[in-house]
Amino acid sequence: MTYRVNTTIPCGNAGDIMIEERRERTRVSFAADPHENGIQTIWFNLRIERCGEARPLTLVLKHVDNMLVDLSRLELFRPVTRRDGGSWERLPAPRLEPLPDGRMELAWDVTPPAEWLEVAIGTPYGMEQLEALVTDCDGYWSKDVIGLSMGGKQMVRLANEYGTVDGDRPGIYLSARCHANETQGSWVLDAVLRRLYARRHEAPLVWVIPFVNTDCVLDGDTGKDMYPWDMNRSFDPKAPTRHETLVIQRDARRWKTRCLPALCIDFHGWVSMSANGIYGIPTVPHESHSPTATWEQLEWMRAIRAAVGDEYCEQQFAWFPCWQTPWDGGWWLSRFLAVETGAPAMVFELPDTYVRDRMLSQEDYIVIGSRFGDAIIDRLNAIV
Ligand SMILES: [Zn+2]
């Protein structure tokens, strides 16, 4: 063998791995592994290590038909790759390889690495990247363990200040990765937190749950429509259906007593093969699921949209999409926060690959997150 596949990297995921030495090239085929707790598969992240001569290499993604992607636009499917410690780049357009029974595989011919090459559906963001953020911000973000996940992993919360009981400082509560595969939510949140650090003398009190679904993030699971409950449908305040939910609910209740709750944002995302841009979903501050928004929510959305810019945003920026999932209308994290804290709470859906014809890079996530950070500080300064 000239190559081997390593899935024990942080957030690693690949299954049905096959390595074939063909006449001209080595062909490494793999699939996104649902692991043991997911209905959906989408996340994959693997390292291909050289253990022989540098033969030309072909990557083949199998079982695409079972993935949570737009099967009508597979030519736009652009995973990311990095080699030998370099930066992440998008793969070129895939070669579509239909199988005789109608299934489809996607193939990419790539340059052999000196030592290794990683490939993932989106740029990975796990504990290593979170540690880098905390280090780069010189101790500004305190990192506390607020409980354990159902898999026994430490659930982390960042805070720039703890506040005091009955404190009157405006507070915001941020979160990402209810759905573990949505790493663009983490990259944007990372840039928000760096921006808040850069403008720390104007920043409000900020508490952050960087990995709502800690187990799935760290284990390299997709974590979308997971069994038996999607994390973002499990926040019923009367009957939380996961332990992580209970931990975050208690943390949010703690937060609201130590500041004046001003804003809650939960970042999400999707693989954007047919994307018009970022949009926001206001969540109603009561138990009904009717699609209405408060004036305050819409004012926040206007401010954020103006700051983030037309080039990244969907024309209809605030709306109520309807997904087909087994838990339509359930208790989202943001709905819980709206009901529990009375603060305007919203979800932002971030495209991963494209906004219309524009292909997004890491730099775009940094720009988007910085603008979110500016919008938060500028609007709070304007209204408080
Ligand atoms: Zn999501």
Image (cartoon, helix red, strand yellow):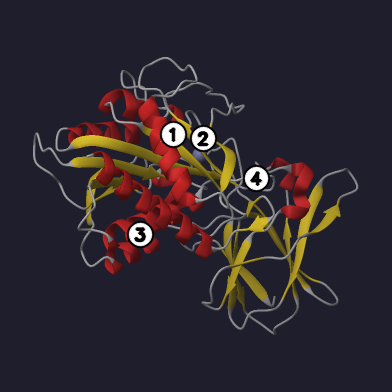
What is the three-letter code of the residue carrying label 4? Ala
Neighbor class of circle 3 (other Cα within 10 Å; few <14, some 14-19, many 20+) is some
The residue pinned by badge 1 equals 231
Please report whichever mark, 2 or 1, sits nearer to the chain's N-terminal start: 2
Whether label 2 touches label 1, CB < 8 Å: yes
| Tag shown at residue 130 | 3
Looking at the rendered structure, the secondary structure element under dot 2 is: loop
Vertical side of 289 occupied by 313: above or below: below
Looking at the rendered structure, the secondary structure element under dot 3 is: helix
Q: Is residue 252 visible?
A: yes
Please report whichever mark, 4 or 1, sits nearer to the chain's N-terminal start: 1
Q: Viewer-nearest of labels 4 and 2?
A: 4
Whether label 4 touches label 2, CB < 8 Å: no
Looking at the rendered structure, the secondary structure element under dot 1 is: helix
Please report whichever mark, 4 or 2, sits nearer to the chain's N-terminal start: 2
Specify whether tag 4 is near ligand 1 (CB below 8 Å). no
Please report whichever mark, 4 or 3, sits nearer to the chain's N-terminal start: 3
The residue pinned by badge 4 equals 275
Vertical side of 167 occupied by 236: above or below: above
Task: Please report the residue visible at 75 percent of the width from the left and 43 percent of the height from the top.
Answer: 71
Specify whether tag 1 is near ligand 1 (CB below 8 Å). no
Looking at the rendered structure, the secondary structure element under dot 4 is: loop
Please report whichever mark, 3 or 1, sits nearer to the chain's N-terminal start: 3
| Tag shown at residue 226 | 2
Name the side, left or right, on which 301 lies relative to 48. left
Q: CA distance from mark 4 to mark 1?
A: 24 Å
What is the three-letter code of the residue carrying label 2? Met
